[in-house]
Image (cartoon, rainbow, N blue to C red):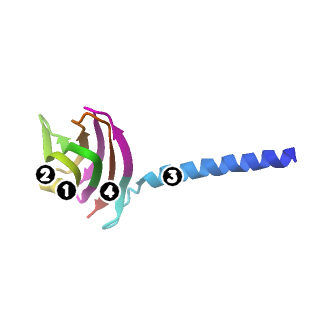
């Protein structure tokens, strides 16, 4: 009986381990061979941002690819998409006091071959908030 119980515990632990690895793989997937319309990078996340805090996530996007994003927040936030030019920070998207937004970033519209585009949320409010977002880098 004791052997069966130990075997059951081992199998259960293995199942939990395999499920946790699968969840991580599903949360952030990479396929660097992208065919037309194929997903190169994808991320779905839910994060908490403290009062007067901020959160940032960056994605590498090359010419011939686009970054699609959308988010919703439990409170209105300040939001931007930016990248770092040679001597300044450039903001293709700059929004204030919004709780949801979606859009597409195309490096070709900014005359770039490759860039890290960063999505940033700032919580100006007095209480913590939840942000849920999804970002996809797609081959055109």
User: Are the residues flagged by discs 2 and 4 in contact, CB closer than 8 Å?
Assistant: no
Q: Which residues are magenta?
A: 44-69
Circle 1 packing at 10 Å, graded few (<14), some (14-19), many (20+), is many
**Nearer-the-camera pick, 90 or 126:** 126
Tell me the residue at 67%/46% (across/down). 13
Disc 2/disc 3 C-alpha distance (Å): 35 Å
Residue 117 appears in the picture as rendered: no
Numbered badge on residue 110: 2
Is 115 magenta? The answer is no
Q: Earlier in the sequence, mark 1 or mark 3?
A: 3
Disc 4/disc 1 C-alpha distance (Å): 12 Å
Disc 3/disc 4 C-alpha distance (Å): 17 Å
Q: x, y (%) of residue 102?
A: 23, 56
State which mark lies toward you, 2 or 4: 4
Tell me the residue at 34%/66% (across/down). 35
Numbered badge on residue 136: 4
Q: x, y (%) of residue 66?
A: 24, 58
Is 52 magenta? The answer is yes
Disc 1/disc 3 C-alpha distance (Å): 29 Å
Classify residue 109 by image quadrant. Answer: bottom left
Q: Earlier in the sequence, mark 4 or mark 1?
A: 1
Q: Secondary structure at mark 1?
A: loop
Q: Secondary structure at mark 4?
A: strand
Q: How many marks?
A: 4
Tell me the residue at 15%/39% (across/down). 85
- Judged left or right of residue 57, residue 112 is left
Q: Which residue is mark 1?
A: 106
């Amino acid at each position: 009986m004791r052997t069966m119980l130990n075997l059951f515990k081992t199998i259960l632990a293995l199942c939990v381990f395999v499920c946790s690895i699968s969840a991580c793989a599903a949360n952030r997937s990479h396929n660097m061979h992208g065919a037309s319309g194929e997903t190169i990078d994808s991320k779905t996340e839910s994060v908490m941002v403290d009062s007067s805090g901020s959160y940032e996530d960056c994605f590498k996007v090359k010419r011939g690819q686009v970054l699609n994003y959308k988010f919703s927040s439990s409170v209105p936030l300040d939001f931007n998409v930016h990248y770092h030019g040679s001597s300044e920070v450039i903001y293709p998207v700059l929004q204030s006091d919004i709780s949801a937004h979606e859009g597409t970033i195309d490096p070709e519209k900014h005359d770039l071959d490759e860039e890290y585009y960063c999505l940033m949320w700032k919580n100006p409010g007095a209480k913590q908030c939840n942000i849920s977002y999804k970002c996809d880098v797609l081959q055109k």
